[in-house]
Amino acid sequence: MSRPFLLGLTGSIGMGKSTTAAMFMAEGVPVWDADATVHRLYAQGGAAVPAIAVLCPDAAVDGAVDRNRLKRWIGANPSALKQIEAAVHPLVSAHRAGFILAESALHQSIVILDIPLLFETGAEAALDATLVVTAPEAVQRTRVLTRPGMTEAHFQAIVSRQMPDADKRARATYVIETVTLEDTRAAVRRLLREVTKSDA
């Protein structure tokens, strides 16, 4: 059984990653979402709940992980994030592997792996190609600051923790600019034609 072409999708906050992922789905391409997987693992009865309960008992509430309590623990404990990653990343990787296996059985030719920290975690090593979505800084800022509860200070704090957009673009196999929906959709379709053709 041959596996699908694995295309990693990433991009900084406000660059249009979720919108682009939805466009791939609209074209019939299966998308695995790292953030959504973590949410499921933290939900009631999720596989990550017992491990988090051991690390931070206060964050385990009614069989689920209270993300706000977990964030407070992370903020107060310099080693917390590494401990959480060590416990949760193997579960995320196992879920991703299961997704790829299932799509292989369905003879999918390509799957998208939506991974926010793709380059930061070295996940690109296991992929066939990477796609970075980008937009001019002014467009990014406008998008993010229209989100409920977002402030300029919070936006800058998030950006400072992410790999610079220029660095991501330099490391990517493909880059799509997401200024307009029409251009983004056209770029998605061009990329799919290219990948499908090269993979034939």
Image: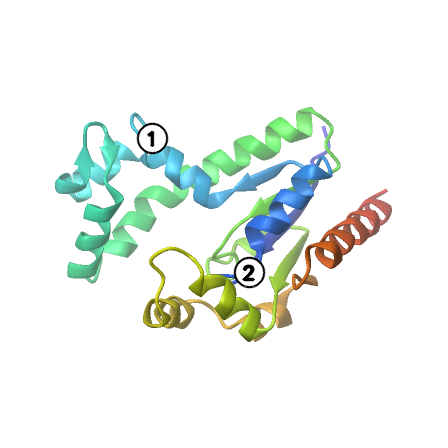
Q: Nearer the viewer, residue 151 or 99?
A: 151
Q: Which residue is at the far left?
A: 58
- Residue under the image location 64 percent in, 56 percent down: 130
Q: Nearer the viewer, residue 67 or 85?
A: 67
Q: What is the x, y in percent for residue 104?
A: 67, 30
Quadrant location, the C terminus: top right
Instruction: Say if residue 125 shows up in the picture.
Output: no
Asked if residue 58 is positioned above or below residue 147 in the image, the reply reads above
In the image, taking residue 85 as reference, residue 194 lies left or right, namely right
Which numbered disc, 2 or 1, marks the residue that appears first in the sequence? 2
Q: Residues within 10 Å of mark 2 (few under 14, many from 20)?
A: many
- Residue under the image location 62 percent in, 61 percent down: 132
Q: Nearer the viewer, residue 54 or 143?
A: 143
Asked if residue 142 is positioned above or below residue 99 in the image, the reply reads below
Distance from disc 2 to disc 1, alpha carbons, whole Å, reads 27 Å
Please name the residue that numbered disc 2 is placed on. 11
Instruction: Say if residue 9 shows up in the picture.
Output: yes
Kind of residue sitting beneath label 2: Gly
Please name the residue that numbered disc 1 is placed on. 47
- Residue under the image location 75 percent in, 58 percent down: 183
In the image, taking residue 198 as reference, residue 20 lies left or right, namely left
Quadrant location, the N terminus: top right
Q: Residues within 10 Å of mark 1 (few under 14, many from 20)?
A: some
